[in-house]
Image (cartoon, grey):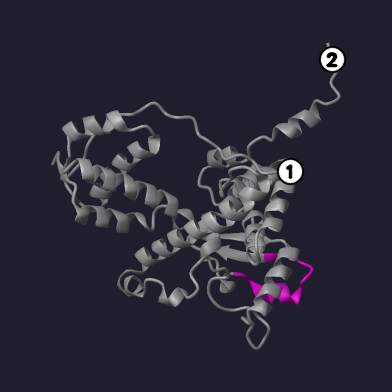
Amino acid sequence: MDELNLTEALEENLYAWMIPKYAVGTINNRRNFIKSLMVKHKVLNTDTLRKIMKTIKHQHQRACITMINDYCYENNIDFHIIVPSIKKQPTKIPDLLSPAEIKLMVQSVPKPYDLTIRCIFNIGAGLRVSEIIKIQWDDISWVDWLSNQEHYGVAVIKAGKGSKDRVVNIPKLLMQDLYNYAKELNTLNEFGVPTGRMIFKFGVENVDNFMDELRQENFDKWKNEYIKTSYNWFRYHIIQGCCEKALNKKIKIHSLRHSRATYLYEVEKVPVEKIQVLLGHSSINTTMLYTKINPTSVFELIKDTKEI
C-alpha cells in the first residue's frame, strides 16, 4: 500500500507506540509534528510527502516520517514510503555551565529544588530531567549506605531513554543531604530507611489525584503526561523564574548533564567509556558530543607557549 490515512486513531496509536521507545521531549515533538501534518493533509503518499519535504527544516522532522514506516512495519500495516534525505544540520550542543554558575543556580532556587539541581548535576554523569522527575526513594540503595556513610551511594535509574535501566553513583555529601530531606518529609520507616515514591514534586501536589481517570485507563500515557507537566513546571518556575535571572542568560536544562560529563572527562579524567556507561548512551559517539572541550582548559595548556 502506498497511501496511509492520517487519522486521529493513527495519531493516538503512534503516541502509545512511541512511549516505551523514546524520551518525553522526543515524543512530544514528534506528536506535535504529526498533528500539524494531519491539519494540512488527509493522507500520506508520494504527492503529499513531496509537499511536506519542501517545508521540513530539521532532520528530526524527517525522522518522524521514517518513524511512521517503522510503526507500520512493526504493526503489520502494509505501508512504506521512501523518505528522501535532507541537508543535515550541524548538531547543536547546549552551552556548558561553569562550576561557579551551577553553584549560583543552586543558591538562587527555593528549597528543595536546590537539591534537585544538585541531583541532576552530581548523580552519575548527570541525569535527564525526566529521570529526576521519576526517581523514587526506593530507587536508592539506602541500607548499604547507612551501614557505611563514609561511602558513596548507589541508585538505579529505571526505564531511562530506550527503556533501559542503569546503575549510578551518588556522592556521599549529596546522599547525606537527601537523607536529611527524607527525615524532614517523615518518609523513614521503622528502621530509618527512606521509603516511598517520587522524591521531588514539580507542581503536582498529589500524584495519586493527577489525571486519575487516564491513569486507570493507560498508565504509560499517564506517566508521559505527568512527566510533561512536571518538566514544564520545573522549566518555567525554577529554570526560567530563578536560574536564568540569577545568571542573566538563557539556560537549557540539558546543559547541566552536558556540563557534568565534560567536567568528569576534563577535570576528573574519567575515561570516556566509563562516562558512556554512566550516561546510558548506546553509542560512544553520542558521549563524545557530550564531552565538549572547554576552551578555558585549552587556554591553560598553551598559556606558557612562546610568542613569535
Residue at image position (44%, 51%) is 25
Residue bearing the label numbered 1: 269
Residue at image position (39%, 26%) is 87
Look at label 1 and name its amino acid: Lys
Q: Residue furthest top?
A: 308
User: Which quadrant would residue 211 be assigned to in this image?
Assistant: bottom left
Look at label 2 and name its amino acid: Glu
User: Which quadrant would residue 4 be assigned to in this image?
Assistant: top left
For marks 1 and 2, give the CA distance. 29 Å
User: Which quadrant would residue 199 be assigned to in this image?
Assistant: bottom right
Q: Nearer the viewer, mark 1 or mark 2?
A: 2
Residue at image position (39%, 54%) is 21
Residue 97, x across and y down, in percent: 66, 44
Instruction: Answer with left or right where residue 147 lies relative to residue 159.
Output: right
Q: Earlier in the sequence, mark 1 or mark 2?
A: 1
For residue 69, the mark is none
Find the magenta span and give its range: 140-153
Instruction: Answer with left or right where residue 32 lies relative to residue 172.
Output: left
Residue 11, x across and y down, in percent: 25, 53
| Towards the viewer: 111 or 169 | 111
Question: Mark 2: few, some, or many residues within 10 Å (few <14, many ≥20)?
Answer: few
Residue bearing the label numbered 2: 307
Residue 139, x across and y down, in percent: 57, 70
Say what secondary structure mark 1 lies in.
Answer: loop
